[in-house]
Image (cartoon, rainbow, N blue to C red):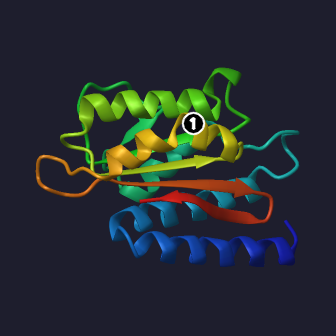
């Protein structure tokens, strides 16, 4: 990764983190930790694989690292659990199997919200295959409804969708 790319990515992480922090400081922390480590993994695997190097295993390692063994619901990878947790991370990257497209991952997120909305308070979705038209047509209304409610502890649900590109991150949805 060249210096210009590294600087652009670093700046984008700070910008997106500040935007999310304006709504939910906890979600901003989750994003910051994930984003920094995704970039480190991208550097680490540079040249070893033809496709983007982030896999479910890499993301699980990242989660263990930033949470110190703490627990978080993850979609579509991770240990299957019926336990609902306050934080949820969903990742839809092209390097994952084709059944984990953005719309399919978002479908799993919406099902998770139905079963865990009483506990969950923040959801981060990271993707590299964003389609604004499909999101507005198929998902935005559900996101808006979910983020207009609170969990059983009266904590507002917050959701951020972040697009990962070659030169950094950009916020696509935040409420």
Query: Which quadrant is home to the C terminus?
Result: bottom left
Secondary element under disc 1, as helix, strand or loop, is: helix
* Towards the viewer: 19 or 93: 19
Q: Is residue 151 above or below residue 167?
A: above
Q: Residue at x 19, y 57 (%)?
A: 155
Kindly identify which residue carries mark 1: 57
Residue 21 lies in quadrant? bottom left
The furthest residue to the left: 153
Q: Is residue 174 above or below residue 130?
A: below
Around disc 1, counting alpha carbons within 10 Å, would you say few (fewer than 14), some (14 to 19), or many (20 or more)? few
The answer to whether any part of residue 95 appears in the image is yes
Query: Which quadrant is home to the N terminus?
Result: bottom right
Q: Residue at x 26, y 45 (%)?
A: 120
Q: Residue at x 34, y 51 (%)?
A: 147
Q: Is residue 118 left or right of residue 102?
A: left
* Towards the viewer: 81 or 47: 81
Number of marks in the rendered image: 1
Q: Is residue 15 left or right of residue 11?
A: left
Q: Is residue 47 above or below residue 40?
A: above
Q: Residue at x 66, y 63 (%)?
A: 169
């Amino acid at each position: 990764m060249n210096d210009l790319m590294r600087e652009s990515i670093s700046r984008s992480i700070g910008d997106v983190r500040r935007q999310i922090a304006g709504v939910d400081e906890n979600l901003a922390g989750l994003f910051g930790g994930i984003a920094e480590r995704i970039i480190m993994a991208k550097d680490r695997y540079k040249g070893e694989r033809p496709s983007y190097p982030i896999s479910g295993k890499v993301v699980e390692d990242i989660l263990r690292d930033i949470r110190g063994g703490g627990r978080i619901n993850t979609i579509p990878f991770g240990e299957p659990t019926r336990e609902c947790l306050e934080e949820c991370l969903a990742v839809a990257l092209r390097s994952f199997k084709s059944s984990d497209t953005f719309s399919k991952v978002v479908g799993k997120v919406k099902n998770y919200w139905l079963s865990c909305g009483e506990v969950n308070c923040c959801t981060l979705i990271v993707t590299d295959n964003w389609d604004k038209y499909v999101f507005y047509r198929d998902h935005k209304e559900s996101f808006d409804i979910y983020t207009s409610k609170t969990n059983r502890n009266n904590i507002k649900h917050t959701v951020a969708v972040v697009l990962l590109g070659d030169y950094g991150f950009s916020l696509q949805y935040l409420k």
